[in-house]
Image: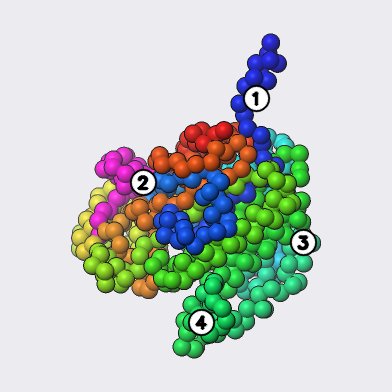
């Protein structure tokens, strides 16, 4: 009887995939699927035509930056639970700035000898990969990206490896957290010195017939053409990631273990390009089209290696991006640039006037200042009052929309609209600053280009696409959170949900 009941319920569960290909495009707004749809004919087109397409997916947190998006992706946890509050922050205990993954207890492996390494030690929660691993199945979990945080955070604590690109050595690297030497397949990639072929190269439009077309940028500095920056800021950066992913699939024999394997790949080049030129520049369209083609190449390779119908693909982005303020101004839209020093000065002036002179602010981002708590306690001041004075000063700067204090967020004394909730979910007491400063929509603290990091829709709305066994293709217009991806994967893989997951299972797309 028990066996029959089990068999009956198992019949409703879809066939389990052998490989999960979990993809992030770094800085890819949802509307890039709409605006460039006619140009896609490969990987993205395949996902849009054959997959489950969620058209109203947003991040729940306000701090829409790379580390936070990548930590949310396969954990489902907001910063208030994951502890990943930003790309970098001021660590009060260490008395220094740290990154989301910097780890002085580790060394880099494969790059400059003895360079400091990175690990997921600041991630407080589990990922889908961790849950699969803790179940004890024979599974491999690998993370790959140009950025260390984007390789490490989705893969989790128990990953077999995370690999990223080290621009100092032009090598793919890992850290002693994972292993003491690169695997042979990765060392072989480095020995090929692929980066050398791009010295002096020009990035031409994807459909250029010959090199008479105007390039988007060049790898040679000091010419009339825009200098690309590094390889990571060109489509070749993504091509190197895709190639490395193929090598990892072959080298680690992904898709051929008793348990499910998970490969998390984050394409970083889109972000570097987007920061430099903004979402309305033709270069963003070009790299989006190239990403479509590259994904097609990766999907073909995966299908060939893991066998048709054995791979579950999920794709999202870690955040969107704001338009370039000058572009917006020219088209009669709001926006502008703000001076971070002005905000800090205004806070220091107000605190000095009220409580006396001192070094009131510690190093930190313009939007999340840290107060000098030693000074606050030396003067025997009430921290809540100091925060209130600082917040009022910051809020008096033109084009600052809201300022929350740590005390407000801890006590729940914030406006409970979507933005108040987003900041509450972005706050983690032991790590966060004393103030959260939010500028008006379309205003940036950056002096050039554009950026992201707010709870406004251009930063929060991203694609969420699923394709593979058990997924019912179609368009799903209901509102979902990117946080829903992790618990959904857990359900599809038959494993426990990650420990900080606050999403729901997207069962509407289950077959
Ligand atoms: Zn990013």
Q: How crowded is the residue under tag 3: few (<14 C-alpha within 10 Å), some, or many (20+)?
A: some
Task: Provide the residue designation for mark 4.
Answer: 213
Mark nearest the camera among 2 and 4 is: 4
Q: Which residue sits at x=26%, y=53%?
A: 402
Q: How crowded is the residue under tag 1: few (<14 C-alpha within 10 Å), some, or many (20+)?
A: few
Q: Position of residue 485 (x, y in %)?
A: 52, 42
What is the CA distance from the residue labelled 2 to the residue labelled 4?
Answer: 45 Å
Which segment did they paint magenta? 400-425
Q: Are marks 3 and 4 in contact (CB under 8 Å)?
A: no
- Label 4: state its secondary structure: loop
- Image side of residue 413 versus residue 236, left or right: left
Task: Provide the residue designation for mark 3.
Answer: 185
Mark nearest the camera among 3 and 4 is: 4
Task: Provide the residue designation for mark 2.
Answer: 422
Q: Which residue sits at x=63%, y=32%?
A: 14
Task: Provide the residue designation for mark 1.
Answer: 10
What is the CA distance from the residue labelled 3 to the residue labelled 4?
Answer: 37 Å
């Amino acid at each position: 009887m028990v066996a029959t009941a089990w068999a009956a319920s198992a019949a409703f569960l879809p066939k389990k995939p052998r490989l999960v290909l979990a993809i992030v495009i770094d800085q890819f707004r949802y509307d890039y699927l709409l605006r460039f749809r006619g140009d896609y004919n490969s990987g993205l087109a395949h996902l849009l035509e054959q997959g489950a397409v969620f058209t109203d997916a947003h991040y729940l947190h306000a701090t829409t930056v790379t580390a936070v998006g990548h930590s949310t992706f396969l954990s489902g946890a907001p910063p208030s639970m994951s502890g990943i509050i930003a790309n970098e922050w001021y660590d009060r205990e260490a008395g220094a700035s740290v990154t989301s993954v910097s780890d002085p207890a580790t060394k880099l492996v494969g790059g400059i000898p003895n360079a400091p390494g990175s690990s997921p030690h600041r991630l407080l929660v589990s990922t889908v990969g961790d849950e699969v691993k803790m179940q004890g199945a024979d599974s491999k979990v690998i993370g790959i990206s140009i950025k260390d945080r984007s390789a490490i955070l989705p893969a989790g604590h128990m990953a077999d490896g995370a690999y990223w690109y080290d621009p100092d050595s032009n090598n793919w690297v890992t850290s002693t957290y994972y292993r003491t030497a690169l695997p042979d397949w990765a060392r072989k990639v480095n020995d090929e010195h692929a980066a050398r072929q791009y010295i002096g190269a020009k990035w031409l439009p994807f459909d250029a017939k010959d090199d008479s077309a105007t390039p988007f940028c060049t790898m040679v500095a000091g010419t009339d053409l825009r200098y690309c920056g590094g390889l990571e800021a060109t489509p070749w950066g993504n091509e190197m990631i895709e190639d490395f992913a193929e090598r990892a699939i072959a080298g680690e024999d992904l898709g051929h273990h008793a348990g499910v394997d998970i490969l998390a790949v984050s394409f970083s080049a889109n972000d570097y390009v987007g920061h430099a030129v903004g979402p309305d520049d033709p270069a963003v369209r070009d790299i989006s089209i190239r990403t479509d083609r590259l994904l097609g190449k990766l999907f073909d390779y995966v299908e060939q290696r893991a066998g048709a119908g054995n791979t579950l693909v999920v794709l999202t982005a870690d955040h969107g991006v704001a338009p370039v303020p000058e572009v917006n101004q020219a088209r009669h839209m709001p926006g502008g640039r703000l001076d971070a020093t002005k905000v800090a000065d205004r806070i220091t002036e107000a605190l000095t006037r009220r409580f006396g002179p001192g070094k009131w602010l510690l190093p930190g981002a313009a939007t999340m200042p840290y107060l000098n708590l030693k000074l606050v306690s030396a003067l025997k001041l009430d921290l809540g009052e100091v925060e209130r004075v600082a917040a009022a000063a910051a809020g008096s700067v033109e084009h600052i929309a809201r300022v929350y204090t740590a005390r407000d967020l801890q006590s729940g004394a914030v406006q409970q609209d979507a933005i108040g909730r987003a900041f509450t979910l972005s706050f983690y007491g032991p790590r966060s600053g004393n103030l959260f400063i939010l500028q008006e929509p379309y205003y940036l603290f950056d002096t050039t280009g554009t950026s992201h990091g707010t709870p406004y829709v251009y930063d929060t709305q991203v694609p969420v696409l699923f394709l593979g066994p058990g997924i019912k293709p179609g368009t799903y217009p209901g509102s979902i959170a990117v946080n829903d991806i992790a618990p959904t994967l857990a359900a599809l893989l038959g494993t426990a949900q990650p420990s900080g997951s606050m999403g729901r299972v997207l069962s509407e797309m289950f077959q």
